[in-house]
Image (cartoon, rainbow, N blue to C red):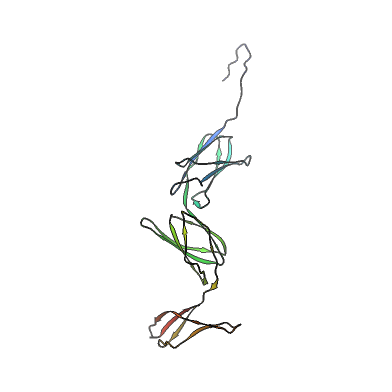
């Protein structure tokens, strides 16, 4: 309020209202230095980079009223929600960004199923991911060292693989051979029977060794081979 009596009034200035935006980051362990928050203005396209405190809190001030996109990143983590849009009119507080797990990146030469498992005293996790040829990304819910086993008709000579969420490195899975499985049913267990795979182009033969034997209800023997 300005009161004008019988003399000029000077020194009056008007300034644009500037707001602040605050929030927190909730991590499964320590947030560390790799978590970054970005605030981007829809009006200007400019982006501010913010680091959080030891408690996960972050804040930015001197923002003009308007619409902003706020996002959180970490190169090897995944989030329940990594981006939010907010219309800023007054000082505002955003809900916490919550880490949902640890990012697993796998580049594979063929489409396969990948079985994963982890077992510790206080936590366990297991399941199967469906991978397509090329780069795949999945979220592991718990920290630890995972055992990864491909399930397919391809041979991966380095399997099983391990993945440590504390030292994350993208995995590259390259199949070197096709896996062929077949069964032969015989009346009795005949040790003299030979099974081989013949290359029709070179006519070379590769003898196979039986992997498993199973007796059927009719007394016959089912022998499984792999090549």
Query: Does 16 sit left or right of 153 as displayed?
Result: right
How many numbered discs sit on the rendered protein?
0
Residue drawn at the location 44% of the way across and 58% of the way down: 145
Which residue is farthest top?
A: 6
Task: Please provide percent x and percent y for residue 15.
Answer: 60, 27
Residue most extreme to the left: 121
Q: Nearer the viewer, residue 17 or 105?
A: 105
Q: Position of residue 166 (x, y in %)?
A: 46, 53
**Relative to 107, is 66 above or below?**
above
- Is 56 rendered above or below residue 209? above
Q: Position of residue 99 (x, y in %)?
A: 47, 49
Q: Indicate the position of residue 187 as horizontal and vertical percent values.
A: 41, 88
Q: Quadrant of residue 193?
A: bottom left
Considering only vertical position in the picture, is 220 above or below 85?
below
**Residue 40 to residue 219: above or below:** above
> Looking at the rendering, in which quadrant would you find the N terminus?
top right
Q: Residue at x 61, y 23 (%)?
A: 13
């Amino acid at each position: 309020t300005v009161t004008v009596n019988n003399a000029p009034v000077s020194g009056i200035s008007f300034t644009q209202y500037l707001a602040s935006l605050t929030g927190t980051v909730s991590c499964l362990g320590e947030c560390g230095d790799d978590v970054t928050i970005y605030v981007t203005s829809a009006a200007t396209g400019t982006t501010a980079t913010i680091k959080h405190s030891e408690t996960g809190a972050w804040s930015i001030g001197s923002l003009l009223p308007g619409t902003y996109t706020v996002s959180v990143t970490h190169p090897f983590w995944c989030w329940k929600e990594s981006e939010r849009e907010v219309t800023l009119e007054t000082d505002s507080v955003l809900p916490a960004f919550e880490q949902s797990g640890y990012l697993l990146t796998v580049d594979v030469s063929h489409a396969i199923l990948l079985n994963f498992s982890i077992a510790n005293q206080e936590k366990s996790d297991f399941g199967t991911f469906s991978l397509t040829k090329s780069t795949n990304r999945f979220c592991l819910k718990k920290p630890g060292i995972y055992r990864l086993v491909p399930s397919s008709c391809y041979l991966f000579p380095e399997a099983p693989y391990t993945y440590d969420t504390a030292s994350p490195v993208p995995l590259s899975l390259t199949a070197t051979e096709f896996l062929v499985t077949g069964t032969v049913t015989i009346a009795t267990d005949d040790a003299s029977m030979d099974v081989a795979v013949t290359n029709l182009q070179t006519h070379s033969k590769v003898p196979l060794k039986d992997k498993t034997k199973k007796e059927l209800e009719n007394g016959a023997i089912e022998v499984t081979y792999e090549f």
